[in-house]
Each structure stands twice: as structure tokens, then as C-alpha cells.
Image (cartoon, helix red, strand yellow):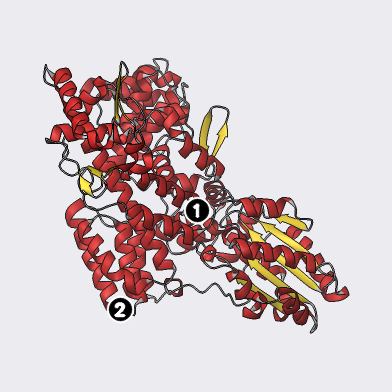
Amino acid sequence: MDEVSSLTVRLLGGSPARHGDGEIALGPAQRQAVFATLALHAGQFVSRREIIDAVWGERPPDSATGIVYNYVSALRRALEPVGEPLVASRAGYRLDLPKQQVDVHVFEAELDRARAHRLDGAHQRELESLRSALGQWRGSALDGIPGPFAETERARLNELRLSALERQAEITLRLGGHHDLVGELAVLVERHPLREGLHRMLITALFRSGKRAEALAAFDRARETIIERSGLEPGPDLLDLRRRILDDDPSLHPRDRTRAVPGRPSAFVGREFELGRVRRHLSALLDEGRGGTVWLDGEAGSGKSAFLAEALATARSRTRWAGADELSGAVPMSLIADCLGGEALDDLGKTVTGLCEDGPRVLVFEDLHWADEESLLAWQRLHRLTAHLPLLLIGSARPLPRRRTLDLLRSEFDGEIVPLPPFDGQAVAALAEETLARDPGEDFLGFATEYTAGNAAYLRELFAGFADGHEPDTTPHGRLAAVVEDHLATLSVPCKRTLNSAALLGSSFTVSDLAGITGREPRSLTDAVDEALAAHVLEAGGERLRFRVPLIRAVFAANTPPAIRAVLHQEIATTMADSGAPADRVAEQLLQAGDELTAPWIPRWVLDNVRALSAGPAVELLNVLSHQRNLTEEQHQELTGELAALLLPETDTAPAWPTQPWCTPLHALARVRNPTAPRTS
């Protein structure tokens, strides 16, 4: 078996099998399909039935088993120069080859490494892994290889490649490589005209390259192409990008992690207890010269920056402020250099001691979850210096993404940890009073608190939209959705896709529900669900899962076009009804489908289950159904009668509360169902 090491398999372009520098002729296309199936399962036995399904699908020839036997025999002869890598047994056939000699497996392994580096905040290493993964491609995936298995794998691999190209471009753009990206992105946009992420990056790269007019022209082409090919307007992110370009939004320019000390927020509410904890340290520093360290914990959007600006407002002249971002891990000690200058890299202790000789100092390091490893170790050294210097050291971090170094640093930390909790109803009302020119009303405030789960950033964007005329509803407007998506940027693509499906399942769901809508085995969803739970996007209550923040669920749901969403909700309701799910859960799906409930089973199901439904969903569902155009006269009468019975009290007096116009015809029906009611002339 020593000679097998000289066999390499290329399914991402080039000849499928190679021995050293030479090609191995594998024969006809279907024989290559057998080889590709075995190579994609390298080291595992593949049954004859699986090979037949892979090559011919549901309609194999009668002689398929014999053909497979002949193909394998021919492949063994072709592979003789590299030994005997094809092994046969009762279980089937196995290509006995290490996965690192199959380019598809190398490609996927490098993508896994890239994802791990991303979660660790090591973006330079992530970029290197992405380049290594993409370097495995020499042409088209499974080029010329027939069969349903090859077709499915080709689509999957092409999608993985495109996602890797997008992520590579995103990192390069953030690192300042916009000039080099324009040509590459232009080619990708031409090949994949419906990928809005590619359009956004091309437009941004053009704008950052000083080509504002070309960026706006690229937007116009993108919008025209998307409408022409999909019949839909571009998503809110792409539309909002044009406005930001016209406004010369500073956030579109290349990022600088060195931050000016922010001024006091114009509107700041709540957090009195937390402010008191930080201000005690500040008073000890300024009044007594006593140093200390504070660690500020808060999820994305919790308002950590505004909180620190408010807490340190009286010490701005003595404060230095720096912050990390997603790409800080690419440059060792970048965060320390941003805050203290290049001289700190030579002698950190001497630099900080010299700084404190002129009086007490405050050093703020924001977003430590993105900081490079060396900066985190230096931050730990700074913490030790606070014991004998007039130095207040403050760090802020999100609980996620998890970092081994950061977790260790925090676990051994002996300073004060100050968590920022979500806003409660009182703080939400105070924020509305400070930021809105009109009273939004108690209903809106209650909706805002629940919808955002008290997240400060989401609340501010929601209030800004309300001030601009967006009435409160569960469909997030463009800027609000953009803020949420920015906070969720670190989630993996498989996790996001799983959450897109989960968002359609209602207020709560099980993994089995999710498997039903995705068509996947429950065990294959474990990684994506665990990632969403770890990121606090989902939370568990017994066996059921739900989105922790309803707004986040709405953002994921909005990723599915409305017409498709309506169809999917009805299909989910069908599956739930067939499996005997509680009536209220089926009704929840139907109500999310919109006003057009076209499935013919729905009216009968509602009539059969109306007594099992809660009053609110029953009334709403009956009202929607009673206006459908596809009803028979008998169905219309039955549905309207049930609605009348629910809305109108069984009493001899005329009902008082149903004042909507659509309630008027129900009185007669109610009298038919309630024979004791008095007749009118």
C-alpha cells in the first residue's frame, strides 16, 4: 500500500486521477462517476446500491449491478500503477486513500480551518486558509461527470466556493485592499448577478477607490439586473448603500481603529447602578491617585460605547481610547499601538509609567473580543500596572464570539466586572421620551421592549424609523435590519441558513420541526443549532427552541421573499396538521402566510378545529378565510357563522363592541345561531 501515496484525486478541475506528474485514464464518463463517488467517500465503504443511485438515480438499467462490477474491475486495472487502492467486500467498495490526497476533502478541511480562525478572531489566518481552500480549484467541479450524485455535489461545491470567494473579498476589503478587488469583484458580479453581497462589495470598493460616480452606476446596473432576473427589488442593504454613498457616510470609508475620545451622549437614560460602579473607580483615580481595572460585559448593541462615554465624561482630557474590530487579529499588538503609540511596543511598562507621571490616566480598550492575542497579553500586563500607578484600565467585550485567550483572561481577572443588562420597560420609556418628538403610546413602548428584548442599538434604530414615519410592525426597515445583520456577521453560513428556515416555524419550534422544513436529518442540524444557542440567538425551554430576540427572527424571516414565504407557511401548516400538532401552532403558520390562504384543505380544517383554537387566533383566521375568493357558498356561510358566534355574545341585548364595518352582517347570522334573540321588524 506504500505506492498509494502517489495517487492524487482532482475533482475540482483537471484529470480526476493522477500518478505523480502523469494522468491515469479512467475511461468513460459513467466509470468516472463511480470513481468520483468512491473518492468523495474516501476511506469508507460505499454499497453497490448507493453507487447505482449515484450514477443512475431512480431509473437504473436492469443490468446496473453487473455494470458496476465491470466498472470497478476496469478501475482496478487502471489504478494498478499506484497499487491496489480499490477494496471490495460484502459491504461494497472502498477507495483506500487518505483524504488529504483528494482535493475536495482538502478544500473542505481548509474551509473548516477558516471558520475556526474566524471564530477565534484570527482573520489573517482565516484569509490564509481561504486562499489555500480556493487554491485547490483548477477548473469546474466534477467536470463532465454524470449522475444525480455528481449533480448534487457539483451544486454544493460551487456554492461553497462562491461563499469562500465572498468571504475572502470581504476580509480583503476590510483590510484596505479595495483597489485590488474591483476587477475581481466585477468578474464575480457578471457571473453571479443575483448575489447581492457581491454587488455591495463591488460598489463599496469603487467608492473607497474614489470612484463615486462609477459606484452609483454599478448600483443602477445591479438594481436593473436583479429586477429583470428575479422580478423583485434588491434587498434593503443594497438600497441603503446607495443612500449612504449619496450622504458620503463616514462608515463607508476605510476603517481606522484609533478612536477619538467620544463626547457625552446627547441622550442617555438608565444604567444608574452600573454608572455608579464605574464612577467610584474614576473618583478613586482622580481624588486619590488609586488605580483599578473595570471589565464591561455586554452583548452587541447593548450600548457599551455610549455608557463609557457617559461614565468618563468628566475625564475626557485624561483618557485614551482605542477599539478592535473583526480584523484586528491580523496585526500583532495593533490595539496597544493604536492606544499608546509605537513606542509602547518596545517597552510597555516604561511608556505607561511615563504617561502617568503627568497625572492620573484612563485607558479604554473596546471590543476586546476582536483583539489580537499579543494585545490581550499586553492588556493583562497593564492590569498588573494599575496596582502601583494612577491608572484606570477599562476593557469592554461581547460574551461572543468565544475566544480561548479571552475566556482565560476573564476567568483570572481580579478587577470589577460590570455587566450591562437589557433595557427594561422603564428605561425604554425614558429613551423614547429623550429621542422622540411625539408620544408613541403605551402599546408601541410595550411592542418595542418585547420586539428588541431591550437591546439599546435596536431600540434607537426602531425609534429613528418611527420618527421617520415607519409605523410599528414586525417587518424591520432597512437600517434596523442592517444593524442586526452586522451583529450576526460572525455566524457561519450553514447556521444562518438554518436560522432562515427556523424563522418560519413560529414563536417556538423543535429540532424535529426544523428537520421537517429543511428536509434534513435532525442530527445533521446539531452543529448549526448549537452555534445559534452559543451565540444567544436561540434559547431553549425544555425540548423547544425560540429566538431570544423577536426582531432577529423577523430579520431572518425577511430573507425569504414574501410570495415564497406565504407558500412555505402553508406547507409547514400542512405538515403540522398531518402530524397532529396543536391547533394553535397550525393556526400560527396560517396567519403568517398572509391574506391568500389558497390550500384547499384549510377551510375544512379550521371549521373542524375552531373550538380547539384560542379565541384571538380563531377570530383572526376565520376573518381572513371568510374573505377568500376560492370558497364555496356553503364554506363561506359556515365560516362566517362561526365568526359570528365567536364575536357576538349570546344575549338578548344588541352587541356593543363590534364596530368594524365587516362585523355588521354578522348580527343576522348570530340571531340564526341564537334563536332566543329578539326579532327586529
Where, by quadrant of the figure, is residue 17 drawn?
top left
Q: What residue type is labelled 1?
A: His
Where, quadrant-wise, is the C terminus in this rendering? top left
Q: Which of 625 and 407 is in front in this view?
A: 407
Q: How crowded is mark 1: few (under 14 residues within 10 Å), some or many (20 or more)?
A: some
Q: How far apart are marks 1 and 2 (CA)?
A: 33 Å
Image disc number at residue 211? 2
Q: How many marks?
A: 2
Local SS, label 1: helix
Local SS, label 2: loop
Q: Position of residue 57 (x, y in %)?
A: 18, 26
Image disc number at residue 183? none
Quickly name the residue at label 1: 117
Q: In this view, does 605 lie to the left or right of 523?
A: left
Q: Nearer the viewer, mark 1 or mark 2?
A: 1
Q: Residue at x 45, y 19 (%)?
A: 612
With respect to residue 153, does 20 lie above or below?
below
Where, by quadrant of the figure, is residue 36 drawn?
top left
Q: Which residue is drawn at 21% across and 42% down?
A: 142
Q: Residues within 10 Å of mark 2 (few under 14, many from 20)?
A: some
Q: Where is residue 334 in the image (x, y as percent from the top left)?
A: 58, 70
Residue 618 visible in the snapshot: no
Q: Which amino acid does label 2 sit on?
A: Lys
Q: Position of residue 168 (x, y in %)?
A: 38, 59
Where, quadrant-wise, is the N terminus in this rendering? top left
